[in-house]
């Protein structure tokens, strides 16, 4: 009886939404792959270890080039985890019978909000109260007070819009890809869907990279010195 109740909870989308289920599955896969590589790590990488090292080194270079070595090494695990998670979720959406967690706006918001919070946390941590200078524009004097107020309002609205744009951009692209594949599968069961599937792989990689890149740039802007 208890086993049946547990199975009903797992497979019932009203109890656990599909985006949560597939998100948990993606997280489990990431953890399993990480533990497998850790237990069999080699000085000369090969196979899965080689692929993972290529991905992590590419993200590390992206973070170091934009944020710098000091703060980049602290923020690298967060950005790299987001990139791999989004990439894995996007690829899962290409498998027949599976769904992509990133085609649900709630999953994307759950990643965009931490980016927003970390941006301002590290901004305050790096600059203290002087972090407010980032919102006041390049001219700071009594004469330019109206301009400073206007710049503060503009920057404030812009920062509030960041998690929204991160969420909607990823949601829109992944949802559109999913519907295009379904429509073309009905029109032409083999030829067009195969071509679109290849394009879907490209879109999956690009969207994961764009999300990670924007998160990196937001964090870089927070820790850099205000001009």
Image (cartoon, rainbow, N blue to C red):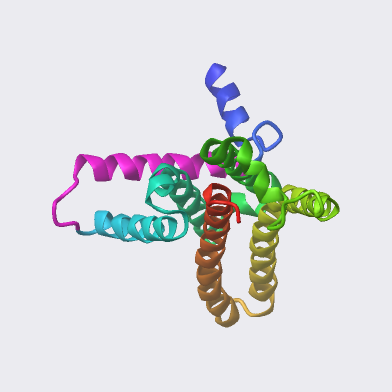
Q: Does the magenta stretch include residue 39?
A: yes
The reply to whether residue 52 is visible in this rendering is yes
Measuring from the top left, give residue 66's x and y in whole percent.
47, 59
Please state which of residues 95 and 26 is positioned toward the viewer in this rendering.
26
Measuring from the top left, give residue 162's x and y in whole percent.
69, 52
Q: Residue furthest bottom?
A: 191
Please state which of residues 177 and 145 is positioned toward the viewer in this rendering.
145
Please state which of residues 103 and 153 is positioned toward the viewer in this rendering.
153
What is the quadrant of residue 23 in the picture?
top right
Which residue shows up at 14% across the image and 57% down it?
44
Give the quadrant of the C terminus: bottom right
Please state which of residues 226 and 83 is positioned toward the viewer in this rendering.
226
The reply to whether residue 163 is visible in this rendering is no
What is the quadrant of residue 123 in the picture?
top right
Which residue shows up at 60% across the image and 49% down it?
101
Which residue shows up at 75% across the image and 51% down it?
141
Give the quadrant of the N terminus: top right
Which residue shows up at 53% across the image and 52% down it?
224
Locate residue 27 relative to residue 192 in the image: left or right.
left
What is the quadrant of residue 55 in the picture?
bottom left
Q: Examine the rendered structure and indicate whether residue 37 appears above or below residue 165.
A: above
What secondary structure predominates along the stretch shown in magenta?
helix
Locate residue 159 relative to residue 67 in the image: left or right.
right
Q: Examine the rendered structure and indicate whether residue 217 appears above or below residue 17.
A: below
Measuring from the top left, give residue 22's x and y in whole percent.
55, 44
Q: What stretch is highlighted in magenta?
A: 19-45
Measuring from the top left, give residue 187's x and y in whole percent.
69, 78
Q: Residue furthest top?
A: 2
Q: Does the magenta stretch include residue 168?
A: no
Locate residue 163 relative to residue 195 in the image: left or right.
right
């Amino acid at each position: 009886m208890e086993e049946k109740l547990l199975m009903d909870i797992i497979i019932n989308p009203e109890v656990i939404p599909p985006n949560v289920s597939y998100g948990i599955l993606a997280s489990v896969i990431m953890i399993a792959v990480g533990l497998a590589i850790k237990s069999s790590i080699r000085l000369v990488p090969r196979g899965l270890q080689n692929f993972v090292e290529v991905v992590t080194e590419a993200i590390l270079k992206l973070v170091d080039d934009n944020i710098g070595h000091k703060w980049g090494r602290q923020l690298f695990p967060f950005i790299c985890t987001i990139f791999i998670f989004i990439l894995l979720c996007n690829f899962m959406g290409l498998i027949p019978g599976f769904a992509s967690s990133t085609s649900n706006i709630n999953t994307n918001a759950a990643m965009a909000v931490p980016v927003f919070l970390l941006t301002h946390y590290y901004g305050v941590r790096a600059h203290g109260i002087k972090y407010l200078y980032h919102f006041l524009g390049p001219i700071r004097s009594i004469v330019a007070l109206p301009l400073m107020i206007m710049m503060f309002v503009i920057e404030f609205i812009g920062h509030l819009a960041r998690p929204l744009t991160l969420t909607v951009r990823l949601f829109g692209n992944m949802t559109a890809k999913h519907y295009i594949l379904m429509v073309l599968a009905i029109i032409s069961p083999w030829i067009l869907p195969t071509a679109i599937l290849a394009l879907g792989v490209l879109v999956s990689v690009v969207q994961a990279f764009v999300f990670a890149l924007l998160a990196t740039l937001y964090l870089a802007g927070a820790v850099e010195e205000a001009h």
